[in-house]
C-alpha cells in the first residue's frame, strides 16, 4: 500500500498539478511583496511630507544634544520590535551612525534580562522601565519611549515618572498617538495603524534623529580634535 501511494505521488500528473499550484502560490507571494512595499511606501511618503513632524523631530534632537552637552544622557525603551529599535538607536549613539566621532551617552532599558525579570517578577511588567529610570535617571536627562500603539503600560509608566523627575520626554508612536500625548514634550506620530509600517517609519526617523543630534553636538572641527589619533573603524 505504501509503495502504491509513493508511485501515485510520483506520477507525471501529480507533478504537473503540483507545479501549477507552485506557480500560483509564487505569483500570489510576489504580488504580496509588491502590495506591502507599496503600502509601506505610502506611509513613508506621508511621513516625508509632514513638515510639523519634521520640526518636532528636529526640536527633540536639539534638546537631546543640549542635554548631552550638559553631561546628561539619553535613555530609550520599547517592547518587541520597539525594544529592538531602542537597542539599535542606543548603539548608533554609543558607536556611530555615519561619521567617526566620540561616543555619545545613551542606554537602552531593554537589554538587562536580570533587571527586566527581577522587576517584572517583583513589581509587575508595567514597571520594568520606570524602575530603571528611578535608579539611573537624573533631572535633565532625556527619555525616548517607543510604542506603535501609544498605549504600552510600561512605556506610559516610564513617561509619567520622567515628568516627576524633570526628565525630558520624546515619544514615537503611530495611529492617533494613544495615551502618550500628554506625557511627551516631543511626540512623533506616524500616520498608520499597521504596526510594521509604523516600525519601518520609526527606524528611518530614529536614524535621522541620531544624525541631527550628532550635528548639533559636534562641529566638524570639534569631532576632528576629539578624535585626534583615534583610528577610523574599518567596517
Image: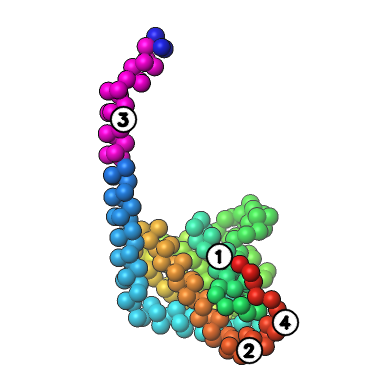
Dot 2 lies on which element? helix
Kindly give the residue lying farthest to the right in the view shown: 229
Task: Name the N-terminal-most of marks 2 and 1.
Answer: 1
The magenta segment is 4-25
Task: Name the N-terminal-most of marks 4 and 3.
Answer: 3
Residue at mark 4 = 229
| Majority SS type along the magenta span | helix
Residue at mark 3 = 18
- Could you tell me how far apart the alpha carbons at marks 4 and 1 are, in whole angstroms? 27 Å
- Could you tell me how far apart the alpha carbons at marks 3 and 2 are, in whole angstroms? 65 Å
The local crowd at label 3, few if under 14, some if 14 to 19, many if 20 or more residues have their Cα within 10 Å, is: few
Where in the figure is residue 210, as x and y percent of width and height?
A: 53, 76
Of marks 4 and 1, the one in the foreground: 4
Image quarter (top left, top right, bottom left or bottom right) of the C terminus: bottom right
Tell me whether circle 4 and circle 1 mark residues in contact (CB < 8 Å): no
- Could you tell me how far apart the alpha carbons at marks 4 and 2 are, in whole angstroms? 14 Å
Where in the figure is residue 27, as x and y percent of width and height?
A: 28, 44
Instruction: Give me the residue at 32% from left, 70% from top.
Output: 45
- Numbered label attached to residue 222: 2
Kindly give the residue lying farthest to the front in the view shown: 12
Dot 4 lies on which element? loop
Does 214 appear above or below 43? Answer: below
- Numbered label attached to residue 42: none
Where in the figure is residue 85, as x and y percent of width and height?
A: 52, 63
Instruction: Give me the residue at 70% from left, 78% from top.
Output: 230
Dot 3 lies on which element? helix
Task: Name the N-terminal-most of marks 4 and 1.
Answer: 1
- Is residue 5 located in the magenta-colored stretch of the structure? yes
Amino acid at each position: 500500500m505504501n509503495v502504491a501511494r509513493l508511485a501515485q505521488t510520483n506520477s507525471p500528473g501529480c507533478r504537473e498539478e503540483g507545479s501549477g499550484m507552485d506557480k500560483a502560490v509564487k505569483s500570489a507571494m510576489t504580488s504580496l511583496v509588491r502590495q506591502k512595499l507599496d503600502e509601506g511606501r505610502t506611509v513613508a511618503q506621508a511621513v516625508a511630507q509632514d513638515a510639523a513632524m519634521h520640526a518636532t523631530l528636529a526640536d527633540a534632537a536639539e534638546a537631546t544634544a543640549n542635554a548631552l552637552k550638559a553631561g546628561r544622557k539619553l535613555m530609550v525603551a520599547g517592547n518587541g520590535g520597539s525594544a529592538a529599535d531602542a537597542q539599535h538607536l542606543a548603539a548608533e549613539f554609543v558607536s556611530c551612525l555615519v561619521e567617526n566621532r566620540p561616543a555619545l551617552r545613551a542606554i537602552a532599558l531593554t537589554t538587562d534580562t536580570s533587571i527586566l525579570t527581577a522587576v517584572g517578577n517583583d513589581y509587575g511588567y508595567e514597571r520594568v522601565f520606570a524602575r530603571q529610570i528611578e535608579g539611573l535617571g537624573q533631572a535633565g536627562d532625556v527619555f525616548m519611549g517607543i510604542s506603535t500603539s501609544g498605549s504600552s503600560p510600561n512605556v506610559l509608566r516610564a513617561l509619567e515618572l520622567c515628568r516627576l523627575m524633570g526628565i525630558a520626554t520624546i515619544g514615537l508612536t503611530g495611529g492617533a498617538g494613544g495615551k502618550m500625548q500628554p506625557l511627551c514634550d516631543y511626540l512623533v506620530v506616524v500616520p498608520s495603524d499597521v504596526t510594521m509600517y509604523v516600525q519601518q517609519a520609526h527606524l528611518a526617523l530614529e536614524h535621522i534623529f541620531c544624525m541631527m543630534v550628532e550635528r548639533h553636538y559636534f562641529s566638524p572641527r570639534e569631532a576632528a580634535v576629539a578624535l585626534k589619533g583615534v583610528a577610523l573603524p574599518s567596517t
